[in-house]
Amino acid sequence: LSLRKIPQERRCTHCKAIATSWAQSLAAKVASLPTRKLREGEYMEALETACEEKSKAPSGEDILQRERLWLCKYLLETIGEEEVWSSFLKFKDIPPDHLCSSEVRLCPKRQSRNQKDVFQP
């Protein structure tokens, strides 16, 4: 699988789902250890676990699951676990719009309220 083989409209959908999944996984990990900060290996494990989770796609849509898994690992390699963790600490979330539009540019970026979305690779 490669980025070019994933249709542009699905890249954005997958990216936003991945950002949400990462945020939920990190929040759960932080909540499970309220008395101390997460160690590097712990937040890396939480992110990798989120990547491995099955997509919420209906059964029989294995291609969507493969795309999401591949894209999740691609995003971790591209952005880096440390950057994802820093974003989570800063925002107490991983903002999907910021990550997917600004960081990796897998989603269209709004130019203004009066213009339609324009994809800017």
Image: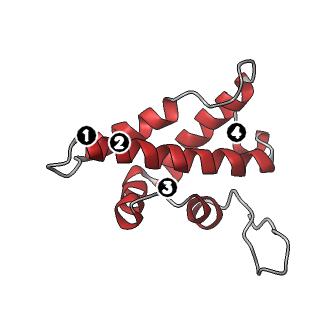
Disc 1 crowd, CA 10 A, few/some/many (<14, 14-19, 20+): few
Mark 3 and mark 4 lie on one chain; the one further toward the N terminus is: 4
Cα–Cα span, label 2 and label 1? 6 Å
In which quadrant is the C terminus drawn? bottom right
Front residue (pair 32, 107) = 32
* First of labels 4, 1 by sequence position: 4
Q: Are marks 2 and 1 in contact (CB under 8 Å)?
A: yes
Q: How many marks overall? A: 4
* Rendered location of residue 94, percent (x, y): 48, 57
Measuring 57% from the left and 27% from the top, which residue is drawn there?
A: 54
Query: Sequence-wise, which precedes: disc 4 or disc 2?
Result: 4
The image quarter containing residue 67 is top right
Name the amino acid type tagged 2. Ala
Q: Which mark is residue 79?
A: 3
For marks 2 and 3, the one nearer the N-term is: 2
Q: CA distance from mark 2 to mark 3?
A: 21 Å
Mark 3 Cα-neighbour bin, 10 Å: few <14, some 14–19, many ≥20: some
Q: Which residue is mark 4?
A: 2
Residue neighbourhood size for the residue with mark 2, other residues' Cα within 10 Å, grouped as few (<14), some (14–19), many (≥20) = few
Residue situated in front as seen by the camera: 109 or 21: 21
Helix, strand or loop status at disc 3:
helix
Give the labeled residue for mark 2.
28
For residue 5, above or below residue 60: below
- Percent x, y of residue 91: 41, 65
Q: Where is residue 41 drawn, in percent x and y?
A: 27, 41
Number of the front mark, 4 or 2? 2
Q: Which mark is residue 93?
A: none
Q: Quadrant of the N terminus?
A: top right
Task: Tell me the residue that label 1 is attached to.
Answer: 32
